[in-house]
Image: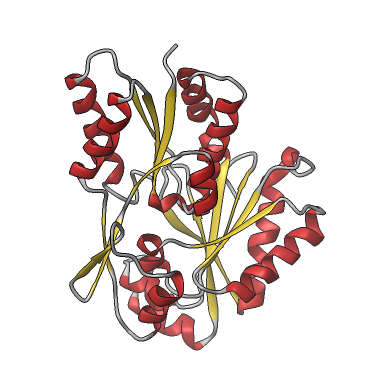
Amino acid sequence: MRDFVITADSNCDLLPEYIKEKNIGIIPHYYDINGVTYGDEINLTPKEFYDKMRAGLMPTTMASNPAVIRETFKKYVDQGLDVLHISFSSTLSGGHSNVATGGIEICEENPGSKIIVLDSLNASLGEGLVIMKAVQLKEEGKGIDEIAEWIETNKLKFCVQFTVDDLFHLQRGGRVSKMTAIVGSMINVKPILVVNKEGALVPAGTVRGRKKSLSTIVSNMERQLGKYKDEDNTICVVHGDAAEDAEYVVQLIKERLNTDNILVNTISPSIGAHSGPGAIGICYFGEGRDI
């Protein structure tokens, strides 16, 4: 059995030290601000990025570059490695299609090589948790096909919920109407959004007030955890440069579940461009994505 490497895209929001330790190959997604493209050699810190959005600049996003995809896959194939790639939701980006096409091309040019591209149907650390599980299974000695089968069978158990602080970022991205954004902001309505079974980010209700929205996503998580509630699975909290609110959610999770197995990171710019500063999300392994 050939050895293999696990690869992903930058939208997985895994911590840099974890990516380095586990030797995960990352294919970047890109974003543009004022005509400057970021995501590869040039990058902004999370604070720089979100401060630009607070100042009124509106980033645009781009999927992964086919040339970079080919270069990445060829590098591993030339080393005699197969590739298991776990991608950002195909419903949210064209990146999955680009990667799948690149994998097919490299395999056609290199008979005997194997590149498996899996659609996580997920985003941010929801995708990241799928990758972490793949790494765990690899370290347990599972082969590439066995891991791919496990992910395909269980990927809809990886759940993501978000709430945002500013409805106008959702309105610009077409998630809510302009009138909804105006009225909702006036009466302090905060949306609850989930990644559904099709891998799309969709509304799942509204509440009044920021603290209420944060406690609601934790309550929803408790319900979705179901039989996994007492297991020590990693729970992730992601935020759009809102560390204080993220810590509030961490404390709520600790109180409700009596766990310290919580991972916190910022939301990558190519996702944050749509969710905006102040977005808060939680990602976890539960019974399913129905709330």
Q: Where does residue 137 sit, x and y in percent of width and height?
A: 58, 27
Q: Nearer the viewer, residue 71 or 175?
A: 71
Looking at the rendered structure, the number of numbered marks drawn on it comes to 0
Q: Quadrant of residue 242?
A: bottom right
Residue 28 vs residue 5: left or right?
A: left
Residue drawn at point x = 49 percent, y = 70 percent: 240
Residue drawn at point x = 26 percent, y = 49 percent: 64
Q: Nearer the viewer, residue 251 or 139?
A: 139
| Position above or below: 276 against 21 | below
Residue drawn at point x = 24 percent, y = 22 percent: 107
Residue 188 seen anywhere in this rendered image of the structure: yes
Residue 225 vs residue 197: left or right?
A: right
| Position above or below: 47 against 137 | below
Residue drawn at point x = 67 percent, y = 69 percent: 247
Q: Where does residue 148 sit, x and y in percent of width and height?
A: 46, 25
| Position above or below: 268 against 289 | below
Q: Where does residue 230 sit, x and y in percent of width and height?
A: 79, 42
